[in-house]
Image (cartoon, rainbow, N blue to C red):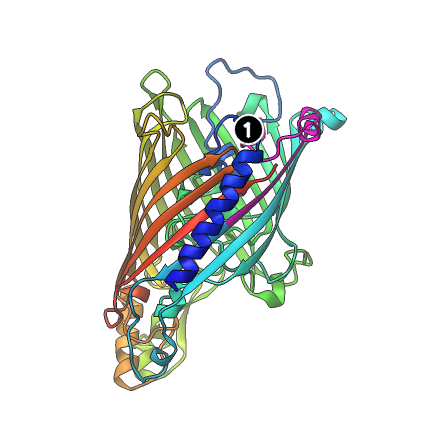
Amino acid sequence: MFAGFFGAVRGGVAAALLLAVLGAAPARAQIMDREIGSAPAVRVDTPLPAHDTMKTGVPPFSHPEALFPNALSDWLRGHGVNLLVDNVNEFAGAITPPTRGSTPGFSNYRQGASNAGQYAVQLDVDWEKLAGLDGFATHMITIGRYGTTANRMFGDWLNHASEVYGGGGNVVVHLVYAYGEETLLGGRIAIAAGRMAEISDFAASPLFCNFQNGSFCGRPKGITDTNYDAGYPAATWGFRVRGRPARSVYVQTGLYPIEDGIYQVFQHRTGFKFNGANIIGYAAPVETAWEPIFGHGRLPGHYKFGAQLFSTPQNDNFLDLGGMPYALTRQKQKTRSASWSSWAMFDQRLLHYRDRESGLTALCGMIYNDPHTSLREYEVYGALLNRGMFASRPYDTLGIALTYTKIAPGVTLSEGYLLNRHAALPNHATGVQRETMVLEVNYAIHVMRGVILTPLLEYYVHPNGQYNLRDAALLGFKSHIQFM
C-alpha cells in the first residue's frame, strides 16, 4: 500500500513539475472554492453590489484560473458561453489495520487503499448576450466518475473517504443538472427551473470542498440522510425562487418532486431519464441568510438557517404499527406520513492577509433531522481554512475539519434488540450504531496555474457509528486540475 501511495505522489509531483515547465505566465490563483459544482452555491452566496441598480442582468459566471487558457475560451466567454473542464482525483490509504473477526462482515475487512475521481464539464450560457433575453441564463454539468472509496474496507458506510465516489452511474457521461435561471430587478429576484440538484442551492457552501472526506464535502452528510434529497450528482425536476429584500439578506424556497431510486442505477444511471413516472412525493425547502461584510469589505460572512419538508411516507426507525418496538415484535414498521430536516450553517473570515482571496476563515454548523425517520439524528461540524498564512505561498491553504454525527436513538435501540436475537442489522452495520467523528487535516498546495495538490490525513473515530470497530487513520491526497 505504501509503495502505491508514494508512487502515486511521485507521479503526481513529476507531472505537475512538467506542466509547470511547459505552462505560460501565472494567472490569478485558483482556489478550491471555485471548482466545478460549486457554481450554484457561489451565486447564492454573492450579495448585491455596493452600488446596485434595478437593471436586469445575468450574474457573472464562475471563472477559475485554468491550466490551458486560450483565445477561444476568452472569445466564447465574451459572447456569453462559459465552458469549464476539470478533473478531481482523490486517493486514500489506511495506515491502521481494520477490526478482525470471523463473523459475517468482519471477514471482508482489510487494510488497503483506494482511488476515486471525477472529470466534469460545465456549460453556462448567457442568453442575454446571445439572443437578447434579459437576465436569462442556462446551466448544465455532466460528469464521469471512476474508482472506489477506502472507508468500506474498514467497515464504515456513513462517510466516504473520497467524496467523489458514487452516484455517477458507471457511465462515460452522467447528467448532473440542466436548468434555466431568470434574474430580475438587478439580482433582487432569481427564478430557476429544470433538472436541479436541490442541495447545490440549499444548505450549500463553496467552502465545503476544500476537504476530501464525505462527511463534509460536497455538503455535510447529515443533510442528505434521506434518499429523497437530491444532492450532487443527482437531480430531479425542480423549481426555486430567491429574493433579496436587502443587499446582505436573501430568502429562498422551492419545490422538488421526490423521485424513487434517485441514487440507484436502475433509475438514474445516466441522469437523462426525464419521464417523471417514479415521482412519489415532494420536498419543500426554505432558507434565509444574512451575509455581512466586516472590516472595510475584507471579512465576509454567511449565516444560514433553513429547513425542508418531505411529503413522502417513511418508515419509523423504532416503532411498529401497534406502537411497539418492531425489532422485538417482528411486525411491520410504522409509517410516518412526512418527515423533515433543518440546518444552521455559519462561516466568517476572521483575519485578512494580502488580498481578498487570503485569510483565516472559520466554519461551523448543525444539521438536525426528524429523529423518528432518520439514521443520523444530527451532525455538527467545525472547520478552519487558513489561506495565505505563509507570505511566500499566498495561495496555499491549511485546512482542519471535524464532524460529529449522532445516530438516531430509535436506530440504536432497534439494532440492540436485533443484535440480541442474532438478526441481521440495517445500514450495513456489524454492531450497534451510536455516534462517530471524522477529522481531516490537509494542506492544499497551489502548484501552478490551474493545478492544486492536497496531501491529507483522515481519522475516523467509531467507524460507521460502531464502538466495536477500531478507529481508522488514512493518508491520502486530492488533486484538482482545471483544464479550461
Q: Residue at x 31, y 85 (%)?
A: 102
Residue closest to the far top: 51
Image quarter (top left, top right, bottom left or bottom right) of the C terminus: top right
Residue 114 percent across, percent down from the top left: 44, 62
Instruction: Give the residue type that dot 1 points to.
Output: Ile
Figure check: 13 above or below 417: above
Figure check: 309 above or below 147: above
Disc 1: which residue: 189
Image quadrant assignment for residue 138: top right
Residue 166 percent across, percent down from the top left: 51, 60
Residue 241 visible in the shown view:
no
Q: Is residue 295 left or right of residue 59?
A: left
Residue 85 percent across, percent down from the top left: 61, 41
Task: Write the start and end of the magenta stretch as one range.
Answer: 60-88
Q: Secondary structure at mark 1?
A: strand
Q: Residue at x 32, y 79 (%)?
A: 327
